[in-house]
Amino acid sequence: MSYSLNEVEATAKRAARGAGYSWGLAEEAGKATRWLCAQGLDGTGALARLLEKETIRSGERGPCPLSNGAYLSDSAHILKSDPMMLRQVECPLLLVPFAAYAARRLDTCVAITCDGAEIVTDGAVVSTSDALPNRADRVEIRPSGDLTSIAPQRSRATPNPGDWETLNRFAHRTYAPATEASRLLGAGAGLSDND
Amino acid sequence: MTPPAPHIARRDPAKVMRLSRLGSLHQCRLSFMRQLTRRMAEEAWVFSRPVFEIDDNGVGHAVYTACGPERAYSLVAFAHDLPPEQRSDRVIAEAWDATFTLFDGVPTSEDIARLSRNVPLQEAGRVSESELSLSRANRSVRLWTHVVDSLAAGKQPELEQIYKVGYLMRTTAVYGSGKFGAADREITADRSEVSGPFQIEMLSVYLTRIFVRDLVQHMANVKGNGQAAVLDPQIARWLGIGNSTGLGMAPFIVNHPILFNNWIMAREEAIARVRDIETASSDKVRKFLNIFDRSKLSTSWWRSDHPIQIEKLATLNADLKAISDYLEQDDLTQNQPWDRLVRWSENTLSEDGQELVVSLIMEPYPELVDGLASCMADSNTQAHLIDGAMTVKQVRSLIRESFDWALDVDWTNPQNCARAWYVSEEKLEPRLGERFEEPISDYEQPLAPARDAALACQQLASWQDNAPIAEFLLQHPEHRHTVRRAQMSCVAPYGEIRDNTISAVVLPIDMLRAKLSFFGATHFDPRSDRWVRICMYSGAPYPEELTPQTADLWVYPEAVE
């Protein structure tokens, strides 16, 4: 089934929040997943895998691509002096949207290399190149590279049904259980509308 | 031509963005319905009804197409037979009198077949990228019966009844922007005719009003068995479309600070431009006085049973009397007459009366005001990016700019945090609950920017002034959303509500009215502290009457001769 990018962003944000991320990082997760889907990349799959990994193996996890991605986006200027190096990263695809923000800020292409696979972005689009691994021993992000062939932009997303279900399962944790009191009081109605 | 920057400044956000004032806003020249009707008239849009297949029980579907200079949009309407006990305006309702979608273009019969399997289900169905909105409406039972019975008996309905209710059907949700599979806002954002805020939704409601007029006539014809009267166009004009709005709109204005800022700032800029005028011609003054009289007539039709609104209406009526007295003393032509009127109102009238005055003074000056409509959309796609190089000191200062008043509030006092906004698992209905009485705080949505700003400031206090905020956020991701909002306030000075949105005394209807006033709604009728009914398009010309002469001031009724 096809979903609007707005649905992808809203679901991804709620899912990240449901998995325990702060609201601010959940917002980043929503924007990042949407951006990936707009490039035709599997953002929903990457986020679903990350959230499952993080909840299963909390305590011994490697660097989080959302937290590190957000830092990269906030501090794009650090790339001017040194590349960003990370080890043992889950779902490194999720770093790409943040590298794209950095590319826009630095007005240059940025390359993300994961164990030999590479994606280049100028901030707006990505190169059609290697698929990034689900987990990378070594990630390097630096201003470099050229956009040789460009992935076409998409206006819809077609998530894998299993991944979409995973995201919705996490998102559901942010919804309060239905109770009669909440139904009556919480929305403030109660008067008859049959008038 | 861009007018020179006014010498009179825009009003201070600290004054404008208080909840009680936002809850007193009135429609104005920049309202979204009026933007749409002006455009449709100027561009001579063509309207048609290619399909009307409704049976004698009032069940079936119809298509209404609006054709602009470059594109067509079609309302696909489904009429249902709803048992009275299922008639609910709540999000959690599951059946309605009528359901709608706005189709991008002209639908084929295959499209209609697909939509007929989905649109009547609303949230439980799916629409596609070809659809731009999804909505539903319920009848006003009293007025519907009165109009059908009158017409069927060969008589016209009583105008008094129509003024009292204002509409035959009220929408209970109008979803746009990618909801339930519909096209994202980005798909249409570059089209001039719908690039302004909520133009798709306003078009959908405009077409819905035509459908409802046709449907009530159809039902009267069936019942009248050949004897039915045709609804008098003079009466039909006062039939608007109602809207029943719950808590969903309140989070919207908090969650879209840049967009909300753009609405408020455009209005504030318009007010400043008019106040800055040195002398007014007698023609401009005549226009103003005419609109003021018509506005009084409109207010006289405004009814509510809610104690808060009853009191506000009494005050507003007293304000109208005071304004009338002022206008007898002042001919408004000399010595910055509009600014003098505004300053007088600030010392004399309620916030409701003051906001009415500033809305009304724009009316004679389309040349200064209407162009600002193009600044009201949010096209800033980069606003969410955080500048991590900004120092802790700068961020503290930005937070103080919007939330100085909140930093000394005791946020542990139950009175100050009595409520929590949350989303129910029941159709994801947004709700507001009692934090200390219900198990909801684990589900709290980030809709208390003032409290969160105070918490962030406490944490920031122990950081070095010149530390980059990115370092702070790495250690404190829980304050990331607050820092983002603080940075947005650089470009959006009117983006933050300067009040406590979770206090024991917060009135969510204030937030609803703020948003609805920009739609152009009138006659706000709260049904509780978190639920309001309004009327849209009452007095507006139908397509056959729509001309540049009728397209703008319809919101102000004229006394029947």
Image: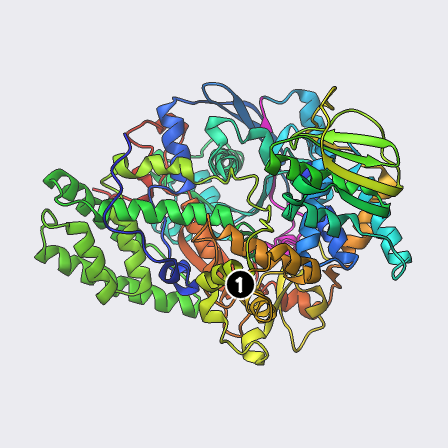
- Reply yes or no: does residue B83 show up in magenta: yes
The residue singled out by tag 1 in the image is: B530
Quarter of the image where one finds residue B435: bottom right
Q: Which amino acid type corresponds to the residue marked 1 in the rendered image?
A: Arg
Instruction: Work out whether B93 lies above or below B196.
Output: below
**Whether residue B341 can be seen here:** yes
Chain at numbered mark 1: B
Colour scheme of this structure image? rainbow
Quarter of the image where one finds residue B184: top right
Q: Give the camera-side residue of A84 and B444.
A: A84
Farthest-out residue, bottom: B413
At 45% from the left and 33% from the top, the residue drawn is B227
Quarter of the image where one finds residue B485: bottom right
Residue B205 appears at what percent x and percent y? Answer: 50, 38
Q: Quadrant of the N terminus of chain A?
A: top right
**Callout 1: SS:** loop
Q: Give the camera-side residue of B59 and B169.
A: B169
Left or right: residue B556 compared with residue B289: right
Left or right: residue A79 compared with residue B273: right
- The magenta-colored residue range is B82-105
Residue A7 appears at what percent x and percent y? Answer: 70, 42
Instruction: Work out whether B165 lies above or below B304.
Output: above
Left or right: residue B95 compared with residue B350: right
Left or right: residue B66 compared with residue B522: right
- Reply yes or no: does residue B173 show up in magenta: no
Q: Give the camera-side residue of B491 and B55.
A: B491
Farthest-out residue, front: A81
Residue A38 appears at what percent x and percent y? Answer: 70, 32
Instruction: Work out whether B233 lies above or below A17.
Output: above
Q: Give the camera-side residue of B300 and A151.
A: A151
**Whether residue B158 can be seen here:** no
